[in-house]
Image (cartoon, rainbow, N blue to C red):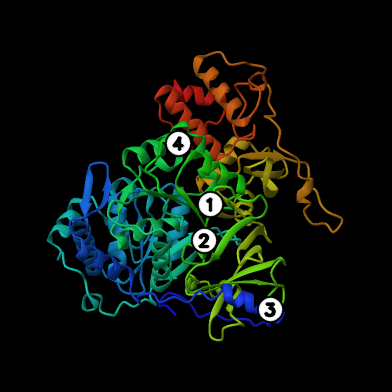
Amino acid sequence: MTDILDPVAGAVGTELLSAADLTLIEGWNATGHPVPTATLPELVQASAAAHPDRPAVRYHDVRLSYAELNERANRLARVLLRGGARRGDIVAMVLPRSVDYIVGALAVVKTGAAYLPVDTGYPVDRITQVLDDARPTQVLTVAALADSVHSAARLVVLDDEATRQELAAADPGDPGDADRLAPLTPDNPAYVLYTSGSTGRPKGVVVAHRSITNRLHHMQSEIPLGAGDRLLQKTPAGFDVTVREVFWPLIAGAEIVVADPDGHRDPAYLAETISAESITVCHFVPSGLKVFLQEPEAAGCTSLRHVVCGGEALPAELQAWFASVLKARLLNVYGPTEAAVDVSSMFCPPKPDPGPVLIGRPVWNTRLYVLDDQRRQLPPGVLGELFLAGVQVAEGYLGRPELTAERFVEDPFVPGERMYRTGDLARWRADGMMEFFGRIDHQVKIRGFRVELDEIESAVLREPEVGQAAVIVREDIPGDQRLVAYLVPAAGAVPHPERLRERLARELPDYMVPSAFVQLAELPLTPNEKLDRTALPRPGAAAERTGRAPSSLAELLLVGLFARFLDLPEQGIEVTDSFFDLGGNSLLATQVIGEIRRSTGIRLRLTQAFRTPTVEALAAQLA
């Protein structure tokens, strides 16, 4: 298994299919394909040896060839090895999106350790929670972020003068097994990623080299990258797509163009960058793709050859809209964090059929099962829970043997192998395509990130003013999902939404902070005394009404933007109204911030919108 996981237990099941159905499904799952048994550093080193002078990565004026990238990663790997990094360790990276991030990821896997990318946009409490759980032996960071890293691990500050001198003196040659003191094999862990947890704390998923290299080779077969291709690395570090964005172009000899740290939030910046840098490939989550297509300059991104879309359901109408704006091919991919990025994929036709969301066919060396509650295979056309099997499946949860045993179970159809139960509803189509129908539990996706509602509810309930709480995803406007928290105050307390939002933003990532807080005398219950989620009311406008209309140019601008992005009449918006209580969410707030930048040249951060979400408070920020 691995050096950093506890063993797993399994379960069994039997088939319940006609011979004809079984033959069909076995044919669709016949995905066996030879893939080189290599690790990530071996693949990148081979690429660097084949074309050392080819451009590998650039960020503004910083440009590295393949030889320079490999050498810099080697030097850093040796610094980490000297600091005690060993096969089976975890080395965390609290680094902004930059060339250092690319160098750091490659350096860590060269040591034999697994790398743990931590999103620098997380609140300090969240970063601490992840580091406490993962217990890395070392943490890579920079001086500007060092104060946000609270860990017993050795801190390696890349822009510290002592570290620079150590790097300059390090051996630039490729580390070998003798340097690592143990052979690095494809079965060893390559990376660890944290995702939302139903128990109220995030959980780490461990993925081996053989799993991610299988997906990268298959990705290269779907979209062959090479000299002249430029991939935009823009995904936040906590999303598993970053692993593909970093290593796929590097094993293929393409170039990575690194986006600004907050660039993924600004569709105008993305359109400008794609055009200026002649980007040929990039990734979007569907909600982000929708925002990007609304940007007038998106149609000018003619260099794009392929767009990869995943992380959320991709509806047919969005596929059609994409085809009407861009001439690039759209690849829809599906896969949970508990697999090596993606387990199924399909190229979207320019004129897709309306209906259920299609997530394609399994990738190389991967099997998809649709099972009933007794884990028996269901025939095509019948809804069931989707299970994943094959080389793509992750090793399990870091230090969580009970949870690993619950979710990673014995594959009853292939003796000796495991499968992962996704909690997703799906069914086979008669043509071998898989249809996706959502979740069977309270887990949701927000902007491609997995969100366990139980984790948010736990955070809300830790607030002293709150006695009871329920958090749901509402979609009162089609295509506009937002998190809403319903509160019953603690005895004698008066919860204040803005203070709650600000405190939660210190603990939770922005995509997990509810956009609206609704105070109730009691939570509605079903006759069985369970929470009746269908009876939770739609949020209204702000409770305190002053009647004060906008009186400054900044307030007039903001009222107009609130009305435009929330589809509300301007006359109904007062300066004390909160963007979030009116129906906004973090994705819409990002669009408002982008429009403010275009209109005024002033750059606001999303955290400012969370802290000062009313018209008058944001206007004061602009002033």
| Pointer 2 or 4: first along the chain | 4
Q: Quadrant of residue 267?
A: top left
- As drawn, the residue found furthest toward the left would be 169
Label placed on residue 20: 3
Please give the residue where the numbered disc 4 appears in the rendered image: 299
Is disc 2 in contact with disc 4, using a CB cutoff of under 8 Å? no
Q: Secondary structure at mark 2?
A: strand
Q: Nearer the viewer, residue 376 or 405?
A: 376
Q: Quadrant of the N terminus?
A: bottom left
Disc 1 to disc 3, how far (Cα)? 37 Å
Q: CA distance from mark 2 to mark 3?
A: 25 Å
Report how far apart the C-alphas of labels 3 and 4 lie in the structure. 47 Å
Which secondary structure, mark 1? loop
Say which label, 3 or 4, has the lower sequence index.
3
Q: In this rendering, which labeled residue sits more in front, label 2 or label 1?
A: 2
**What residue is pinned by disc 1?**
448
Q: Crowding near pointer 3: few (<14 within 10 Å), some, many (20+)?
A: few
